[in-house]
């Protein structure tokens, strides 16, 4: 959807919602000059190869490049499910080939973010809320930690709440399962919001040190206990959950359930809540996932 923007306060601008991709290399600043050159060349090549494999029109991207980082605005016809699924899987495969037999310090590991929202050209790049949000997700502590806690992974992907809701959650548009993603709160600079993290190839998802819920959502496995009366009629349901964590830098939830009635018993025990952390006792959601 687009408009000419001529009558708006800013004027002379074009409003449109676009599909955005942001990528950044982990540990680039610690690499030597030779490795930095290799990383830059590999990022350009691997993004192009992944786009070709996913049949995304790479030539149609409007791209801002900054050494180890890439921000791209895809053409209006670009597919969100394809970018989240086929493109990211191809990018991950390419990274694994590139990293084969390389020293750990010379491995290329990327943080990538995907968002769909308002973005329009400005004098020095794209403006509006979507470019800001995707940059904050890509550079968030939660996404950095998710990649750090999965040392076998080459890629950590953060998608905005909008993309997760429209593309992933219904499990109808991609081959991804929603339980492969973890919800996190992003608090970077002026931005406050939620994102969902997926780490392809991670062993049992992003790793957490014992007693820690640092990176992503720490959610108790809720036990639903049906109480049945003597006549055999179910008359109440109890949902129980328990979380024990050291430091919480994402979101710790005692009970997350779509059960609309009954008893809820959620316990969250933490040593410390970081400035980016949130602790919730009970999170009740409707059938559509809304709170």
Image: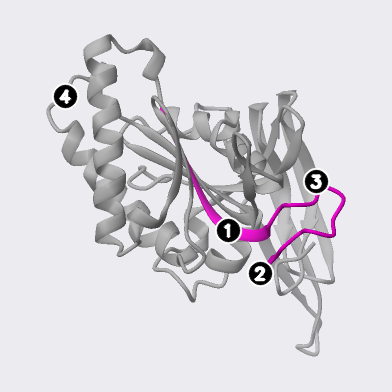
Q: CA distance from mark 1 to mark 4?
A: 37 Å
Element marked by disc 2 = loop
Point out which mark residue 1 bears: 2
Picture quadrant where residue 148 is located? top left
Q: Residues within 10 Å of mark 1 (few under 14, many from 20)?
A: many
Q: Secondary structure at mark 1?
A: strand
Mark closest to the chain's N terminus, 3 or 4: 4
Q: Residue at x 37, y 48 (%)?
A: 200
Residue 186, percent from left and from top: 68, 37
Of badges 1 and 4, the one in the foreground is 1
How far is the residue under mark 3 from the one under mark 2?
A: 40 Å
For image coordinates 36% across by 43% down, the residue present is 202
Q: Is the residue under label 1 in contact with that under label 3 (CB below 8 Å)?
A: no
Report the disc number at residue 281.
3
- Coordinates of residue 27 in the picture (x, y in percent): 39, 19
Could you tell me if the residues under marks 2 and 4 are in contact, i.e. CB atoms within 8 Å?
A: no
Callouts 3 and 4 close, C-beta under 8 Å: no
Number of other residues with Cα within 10 Å of mark 3, as a class: few under 14, some 14 to 19, many 20 or more? some
The tally of labels here is 4
Among the two numbered marks 3 and 2 on one chain, the one whose residue lies closer to the N terminus: 2
Front position among marks 3 and 2: 2
Compare marks 2 and 4 and give the one earlier in the sequence: 2
Residue 191 x %, y %:
74, 36
Res. 18 mark? 1
Dot 4 surroundings within 10 Å: few (below 14), some, or many (20 or more)? few
The Cα–Cα distance between marks 1 and 2, rounded to whole angstroms, is: 9 Å
Q: Position of residue 6 (x, y in %)?
A: 78, 59
Helix or strand or loop: what does disc 3 sit on? strand
Q: Is residue 206 visible?
A: no
Which numbered tag is attached to residue 102?
Answer: 4
Q: Is residue 167 left or right of residue 89?
A: right
Q: CA distance from mark 3 to mark 4?
A: 44 Å
């Amino acid at each position: 959807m687009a408009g000419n923007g001529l009558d708006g306060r800013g004027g002379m601008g074009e409003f449109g919602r676009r599909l955005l991709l942001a990528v950044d290399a982990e540990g680039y600043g610690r690499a030597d000059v030779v490795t930095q050159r290799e990383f830059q060349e590999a990022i350009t090549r691997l993004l192009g190869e992944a786009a070709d494999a996913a049949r995304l029109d790479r030539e149609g991207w409007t791209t801002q490049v900054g050494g180890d980082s890439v921000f791209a605005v895809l053409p209006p016809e670009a597919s969100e499910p394809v970018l989240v699924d086929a493109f990211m899987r191809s990018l991950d495969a390419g990274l694994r080939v590139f990293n084969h037999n390389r020293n750990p310090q010379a491995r290329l590991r990327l943080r990538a973010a995907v968002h769909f929202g308002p973005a329009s050209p400005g004098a020095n790049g794209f403006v509006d809320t979507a470019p800001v949000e995707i940059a904050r997700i890509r550079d968030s502590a939660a996404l950095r930690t998710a990649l750090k806690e999965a040392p076998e992974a080459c890629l950590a992907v953060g998608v905005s709440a909008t993309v997760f809701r429209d593309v992933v959650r219904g499990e109808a548009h991609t081959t991804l399962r929603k339980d492969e993603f973890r919800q996190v709160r992003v608090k970077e600079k002026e931005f406050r919001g939620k994102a969902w993290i997926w780490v392809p190839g991670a062993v049992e998802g992003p790793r957490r040190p014992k007693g820690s819920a640092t990176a992503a959502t720490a959610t108790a496995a809720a036990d639903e206990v049906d109480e049945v009366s003597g006549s055999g009629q179910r008359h109440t349901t109890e949902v129980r959950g328990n979380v024990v964590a050291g430091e919480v830098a994402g979101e710790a939830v005692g009970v997350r359930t779509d059960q609309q009635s009954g008893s809820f018993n959620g316990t969250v025990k933490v040593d410390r809540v970081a400035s980016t952390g949130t602790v919730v006792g009970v999170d009740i959601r409707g059938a559509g996932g809304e709170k």
